[in-house]
Image (cartoon, helix red, strand yellow):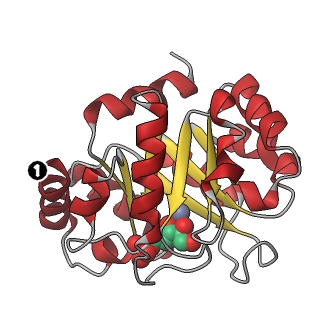
Amino acid sequence: MNRRQRFVDLRAQRPVILPSLLMCDFGDLRSEVDRLAEAGIRSLHLDVMDGHFVPNLSYGMPIVAAIRELTDLPLDVHLMISEPEKYLDAFYEAGADCITIHSEASTDLVAACQQIRSLGAAAGVAINPTTPLADLEIALEVCDLALIMSVQAGWGGQSFEPIALEKLRELRAKVGDSLILEVDGGVNASTIAECASAGADMFVVGSAIFKQPQYGPVVDELTGLASS
Ligand code: DX5
Ligand code: ZN
């Protein structure tokens, strides 16, 4: 099965909680990945930041490739970088199953999504809270996932912005069941249920998981809240 298909198939198991590996212990990635898998996690969200599209810097292809060596879990790579088109091949080679680019960073969103799909990965398009849904909608025919940011991309640990709920509702009403809707930023036990009722299938969670000493209980709690 190709990577795009195995990522798209995850949606059948919704709600899918994706830990954002931004606040994890990078000195012991093996144990972090093992602990997440033991907690029942089915896919990992990798936040790539370039210090240009967003002020913050995180990591690039070598860390994605290192995580690929550690696990068979599908890798959901969120590119917060300028000129993402230049790096699509490299992130696919590093092991990405889904590659998400920001509409604000791309000069030709449709072509970039087509390129991601032709590599064999699922294609995602992200929009920041201040970006209108229309900017993402131009790529609806060629993407597999819409990432509705509920914080301005750049840092973990920010507060959830409710504008994301309106966008999720509007988009779900428009696309029916045909698209994966993912929400990212400030998703925790207080906000996840509303995101689920608004139509999200996939929930990126950073601080609400990594600030806990054990991952299993919080993953179960979040999954329960998103299911009810
Ligand atoms: C923000 C990143 C998120 C973030 C989530 O730019 O895309 O994935 O790390 O972290 P929390 O859940 O702490 O908002
Ligand atoms: Zn992210």
Residue 50 in sight here? yes
The percent coordinates of residue 158 (x first, y second) are 45, 84
Q: Which residue is mark 1?
A: 228
Q: Tell me the residue at 28%/71% (across/down).
A: 188
Q: Nearer the viewer, residue 202 or 215?
A: 202
Q: Please say if 15 is above or below 216.
A: above
Residue 71 in sight here? no
In-image side of 24 versus 192 (left or right): right
Q: Nearer the viewer, residue 57 or 184?
A: 184
Q: Please say if 156 is above or below 129.
A: below
Q: How many marks?
A: 1
Q: Please say if 41 is above or below 166.
A: above
The percent coordinates of residue 78 (x first, y second) are 60, 56
Disc 1 crowd, CA 10 A, few/some/many (<14, 14-19, 20+): few
The percent coordinates of residue 71 (x first, y second) are 43, 43
Q: Tell me the residue at 20%/54% (across/down).
A: 226
In-image side of 117 versus 18 (left or right): right
The percent coordinates of residue 64 (x first, y second) are 61, 53
Q: Residue furthest top?
A: 1
Specify whether tag 1 is near ligand 1 (CB below 8 Å): no
Tag 1 secondary structure? loop
In-image side of 36 versus 82 (left or right): left
Q: Amino acid at mark 1?
A: Ser
In-image side of 137 versus 177 (left or right): right
Q: Tell me the residue at 16%/61% (across/down).
A: 216
Residue 220 placement: quadrant: bottom left
Q: Tell me the residue at 22%/48% (across/down).
A: 40
